[in-house]
Image (cartoon, grey):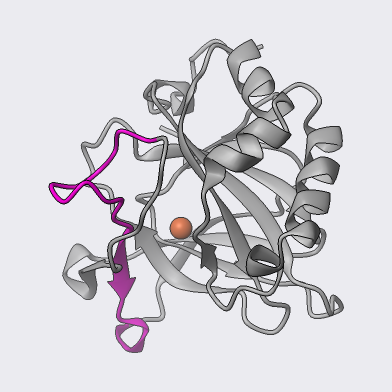
Amino acid sequence: MKIYKNLDLPNWSAIADKVYEYIKRHEEIYTSNNTWVWFDYTDILKEIPEIEESVASVGLSINWLSIIKCKPDEGFHMHADGYELDDPLRARILAPIRNCEGSYTNFYSVPRENMTFWTAPDYDHPGTDRLNERGQFSLHYYLIDESKGPYEKIDSLTLTSPIVFDASTPHQVITNPEFTESRFTMTIETKESLVPFLDENFATYN
Ligand SMILES: [Fe+2]
């Protein structure tokens, strides 16, 4: 199984421009101090229906989506998203929005014993049925003890177009030091398992 694979989402470059305009109009996203920006994504789906149309055109439907904001001097620390290794939804869409040129998403091999499960505070996330027993959305991570590294880098990519990636593989974002504005990406969990798509022999979605 591959760690990531390109996904041909029709019209993505025009959609990314619209999403970037949306982000700039929404101060709470644009200036958020969180890397994982928590907002009511049902609003962006209403304002930019092309997102859902593009995803639907390759036979997929959206469970939830989020904006990931990496400040220019910070990137995103090494972590694995909080999926169990047998979770069929652990493969997610990741798509560039702005300032992804010259940045790297690196993947690492990390022993499980150096990873600690962490749950963010409850999060009101309308529109998804991936809710916890309190009816809230929980964001889970595996935090990685980097002091026990260095860990072997097993792959690396620059996000120039949408991909599907295995979010349970430890990863880290290194931002382009030449940029003074944050790097924005969109990640989408689909209702369908994308794990088979990461198989070398899977017929491409398009
Ligand atoms: Fe992640």
Left or right: 86 with respect to 33?
A: left
Question: Where does residue 80 sit, x and y in percent of width and height?
Answer: 36, 60
Magenta-colored stretch includes residue 143: yes
- Magenta stretch? 128-148
User: Of all residues shown, which one is farthest toward the left?
Assistant: 133
Left or right: 23 with respect to 45?
A: right
Magenta-colored stretch includes residue 156: no
Relative to the observer, which residue lies in front, 41 or 119? 41
Q: Is residue 108 above or below residue 55?
A: below
Left or right: 149 with respect to 175?
A: left
Looking at the image, which residue is at 71% across and 50% down?
A: 159
Looking at the image, which residue is at 74% across and 39% down?
A: 161
Q: Is residue 74 above or below residue 105?
A: below
Looking at the image, which residue is at 72% across and 48% down?
A: 96
Looking at the image, which residue is at 68% across and 74% down?
A: 31
Residue 100 is at least partly visible in this image: no
Q: Is residue 136 above or below residue 198?
A: below
Residue 25 sits in which quadrant?
bottom right
Question: Where does residue 178 sit, x and y in percent of width and height?
Answer: 86, 78
